[in-house]
């Protein structure tokens, strides 16, 4: 009995994990929408197998509601344009090798004319699919009907069953990036404490450069999370969530760039000082301690960015403040040690100063006041853009606020 319960618990955990996977969710949603579109098309289309309806539903249903609404219209336009071109070619010339080439050329040109953006190839694909099976005009118009059925079902599916909010997945990506940065800082710190061969220092530089690819992947996950927050009825204060995550990733991206520059400085220092140590023993130990503390602060910053406004966020903020204070004290100690070392041996003093400057830049980026200023600036910018984009909606909101703030008149006692 216990084994059964454990198996059920493991299965529940596995299903919960799958529900957070965009690929799994998109597969299930697309299959369900396509099946529903096919069932509906069977009731209205004269075709025996109305496959254009599920095809359109597959194209329309997206991972997020926002992307469905913004790209759904362009997808429908591309399919309809392709179907109409296929109807014309079927009625005039039919399917031959030269008419197929002419149809593809015309479809691509029409796709640019109707401004379907990235869905231009789908105009030609739809036209070829319909031309290959269409011989009679009535059948072709049935394809148009199936296209609209698939589009309506796809849009309605995402409206009735709102897609998940992908903030958790984006938060995990941001935290994973922060942990990789911390791991690299620990490695750099360990090597700074002793004799570092140039090959080892160069390897850390390559690892720092590879973080750029991680930034691109995290940015894609964050873009998906931002889209899932837009126009989602289950989300309140979606703009605030988007701004918090976006500014957090921007800060980590800046820290990644500075970390790459730090690795470059240490690599150059290793080339110039080999086979001597990069720093004296106490200075190297302090560099190792400082980079470890900065790495811990980077992870705490990522946890703070991805935490809800709750006790977890408050604890993450307190932990970040403590780690930043500790790292700042260690930085000041390192500055004095480097000054003493440069006074004894002035070789490569520029690189010593560069290491200190780059660590200070990371600490400044993680500073709480600096982050608050960036959040306010980004919120003001996004609000201003929304107001400029939809002025009528902004006036309506201001009017509603005035009505809410207007004090109620007391009843006339004399009456």
Image: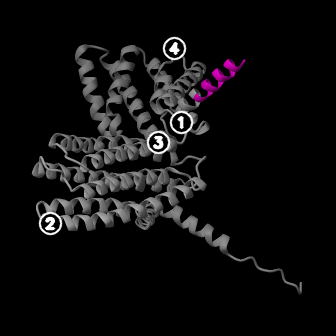
Dot 4 crowding, Cα within 10 Å, few <14, some 14–19, many 20+: few
Secondary-structure class at tag 2:
helix
Secondary-structure class at tag 3:
helix
Residue 311 on image: x %, y %: 60, 55
- Answer with mark 4 or mark 2, whichever residue precedes in sequence: 4
The label number, if any, that marks residue 263 in the structure image: none
Which quadrant holds residue 279? bottom left
Residue plotted at (33% across, 37% down): 118
Which quadrant holds residue 328? bottom left
What residue is disc 3 on? 172
What residue is disc 4 on? 49
* In contact (CB < 8 Å): disc 1 and disc 4: no
What residue is disc 1 on? 155
Q: Nearer the viewer, mark 4 or mark 2?
A: 2
Q: Is residue 273 visible?
A: yes
- Answer with mark 1 or mark 4, whichever residue precedes in sequence: 4
Secondary-structure class at tag 4:
loop
């Amino acid at each position: 009995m216990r084994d059964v319960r454990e198996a059920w618990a493991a299965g529940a955990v596995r299903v919960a994990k799958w529900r957070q996977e965009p690929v799994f969710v998109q597969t299930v949603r697309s299959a369900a929408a396509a099946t529903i579109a096919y069932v509906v098309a069977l009731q209205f289309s004269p075709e025996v197998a109305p496959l254009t309806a599920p095809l359109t539903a597959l194209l329309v249903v997206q991972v997020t509601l926002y992307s469905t609404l913004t790209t759904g219209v362009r997808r429908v336009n591309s399919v309809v344009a392709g179907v109409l071109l296929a109807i014309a070619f079927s009625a005039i010339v039919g399917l031959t090798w030269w008419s197929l080439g002419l149809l593809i050329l015309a479809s691509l040109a029409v796709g640019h004319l109707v401004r379907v953006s990235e869905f231009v190839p789908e105009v030609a694909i739809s036209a070829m699919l319909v031309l290959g099976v269409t011989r009679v005009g009535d059948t072709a118009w049935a394809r148009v009907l199936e296209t609209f059925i698939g589009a309506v079902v796809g849009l309605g599916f995402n409206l009735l069953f709102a897609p998940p909010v992908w903030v958790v997945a984006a938060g995990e990506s941001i935290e994973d990036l922060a942990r990789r940065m911390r791991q690299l800082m620990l490695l750099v710190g360990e090597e700074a404490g002793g004799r570092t061969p140039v090959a080892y220092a160069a390897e850390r530089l390559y690892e720092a450069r590879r973080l750029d690819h991680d930034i691109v992947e995290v940015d894609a996950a964050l873009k998906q999370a931002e889209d899932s927050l837009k126009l989602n009825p289950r989300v309140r204060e979606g703009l605030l969530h988007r701004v918090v995550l976006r500014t957090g990733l921007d800060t980590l991206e800046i820290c990644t760039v500075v970390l790459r520059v730090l690795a470059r400085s240490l690599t150059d220092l290793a080339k110039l000082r080999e086979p001597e140590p990069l720093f004296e023993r106490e200075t190297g130990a302090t560099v190792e301690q400082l980079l470890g503390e900065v790495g811990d602060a980077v992870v705490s910053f990522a946890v703070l960015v991805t935490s809800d406004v709750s006790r977890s966020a408050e604890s993450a903020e307190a932990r970040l403040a403590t780690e930043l204070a500790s790292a700042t004290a260690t930085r000041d100690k390192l500055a004095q040690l480097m000054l003493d070392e440069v006074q004894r041996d002035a070789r490569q003093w520029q690189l010593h100063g560069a290491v200190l400057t780059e660590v200070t830049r990371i600490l400044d980026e993680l500073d709480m006041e600096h982050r608050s200023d960036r959040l306010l600036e980004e919120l003001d910018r996004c609000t201003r853009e929304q107001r400029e984009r939809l002025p009528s909606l902004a006036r309506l909101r201001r009017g509603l606020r005035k009505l809410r703030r207007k004090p109620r008149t007391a009843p006339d006692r004399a009456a």
